[in-house]
Image (tube, rainbow, N blue to C red):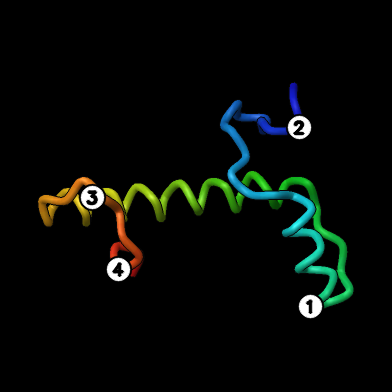
């Protein structure tokens, strides 16, 4: 398995080093590798919702306002 896939086979959508650096800078805590899969799933869900909002408005472009 490559570093960019999870146990479910879905591609990781976040940059692991950036997430880990952010968490460490904010809290001094480490970040479990499992966090990347959870965050990627949340991002997929948010994107899916934004796509539906854009479609419902007849657009072919997802915009910042589609993320509520």
**To which residue does mark 3 refer?**
52
Q: Give percent across and percent down for residue 20.
A: 79, 59
> Which numbered disc flags the more N-terminal residue, 1 or 4?
1
Q: Secondary structure at mark 4?
A: helix
Residue 59 lies left or right of residue 44; in this view the side is left
Distance from Cα at disc 3 to Cα at disc 2 = 30 Å
**To which residue does mark 4 refer?**
65
Q: What residue is rendered at 81% in x and 64% in y? A: 21
Q: Give percent across and percent down for residue 64.
A: 35, 65
Distance from Cα at disc 1 to Cα at disc 4 = 27 Å
Distance from Cα at disc 4 to Cα at disc 2 = 32 Å
Badge 3 vs badge 4, beta-carbon distance below 8 Å: no
> Which numbered disc flags the more N-terminal residue, 3 or 1?
1
Q: What residue is rendered at 50% in x and 53% in y? A: 42
> Badge 1, how many Cα within 10 Å: few under 14, some, many 20+?
few
> Which numbered disc flags the more N-terminal residue, 2 or 1?
2
Q: What residue is rendered at 78% in x and 46% in y? A: 33
């Amino acid at each position: 398995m490559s570093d960019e896939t999870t146990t479910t086979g879905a591609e990781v959508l976040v940059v692991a080093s950036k997430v880990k650096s952010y968490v460490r800078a904010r809290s001094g805590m480490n970040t479990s590798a499992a966090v990347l899969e959870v965050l990627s799933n949340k991002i997929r869900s948010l994107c899916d919702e934004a796509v539906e909002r854009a479609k419902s408005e007849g657009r072919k472009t997802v915009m910042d306002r589609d993320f509520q």
